[in-house]
Image (cartoon, grey):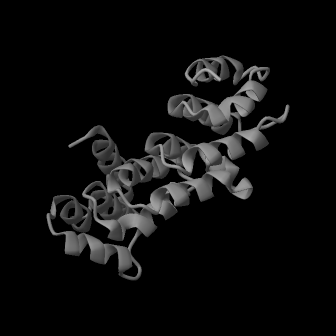
Amino acid sequence: MNEEYRSLTHRLAEEAGESADYRRLLATDDDEELALVLVERERPLWAREIAAFRLGCGGDRRAFETLVLLLNHRDPERCVGAAHALARLGDPRTPRAAAALATNSLRTAYALHPVRLLAELGAPESVPALVSTLSRLLGPDEPHWRVALACVEGLGRLGDAQARPVLEAALPHPRLGDAAEDALSRLPAG
């Protein structure tokens, strides 16, 4: 059992009241049973989260929609688990969905984990989405500096020269400058 799964089960135990249904969803090896949880009416969010996480980590694409919804959730812990499972799912729709969430200016407060997922995926959508998101977060009184910092770090990790102008623009920002300098050092000479 990996750390993300341990964290998920510990967090959801209280939410589920350690019910028999909770224990069954953790113990089952039946992907069909887990997939049913995703479509059955009136299932609690914790049950859908367990099923989607387990299916996603196992590469079952039926978990995709639920995981994307959880990636955009207001609870950061749900986002972490969803990002972990989406990174392992291998669904070609994942980068596009993460880019849409990261670049949605109305959901910037919830963009941290989609931004981090884009950096982890390194898909063709990753650099343009991170550049776009970071560009609009460089204002002097920007409250979402943690999302901006994740963009800077992700662009450094991806090492794409297209990021140079926005990383240079991030240099004077007190909370971003050191990370931007580090990210720029990772880009190919240009």
Among the 4 quarters of the image, the one containing residue 187:
top right
Q: State the image coordinates of residue 94 (x, y, percent, origin top left).
A: 46, 58
Among the 4 quarters of the image, the one containing residue 134:
top right
From the viewer's perspective, is residue 174 above or below residue 154? above
Q: Quadrant of the N terminus?
A: top left
Q: Is residue 186 left or right of residue 171?
A: left
Nearer-the-camera pick, 82 or 49: 82
From the viewer's perspective, is residue 110 above or below residue 163? below
Q: Is residue 175 left or right of residue 21?
A: right
From the viewer's perspective, is residue 123 above or below residue 141? below
Q: State the image coordinates of residue 40 (x, y, percent, origin top left).
A: 35, 81
Q: Residue at x 25, y 70 (%)?
A: 34
Q: Residue at x 74, y 21 (%)?
A: 171
In this figure, what is the number of numbered marks? 0
Q: Residue at x 29, y 38 (%)?
A: 3
- Give the farthest residue toward the right: 140
Nearer-the-camera pick, 126 or 41: 126
Q: State the image coordinates of residue 78 (x, y, percent, origin top left).
A: 46, 52
From the viewer's perspective, is residue 164 above or below residue 91? above
Q: State the image coordinates of residue 159 (x, y, percent, origin top left).
A: 54, 30
- Give the farthest residue toward the bottom: 41
Q: Quadrant of the C terminus?
A: top right
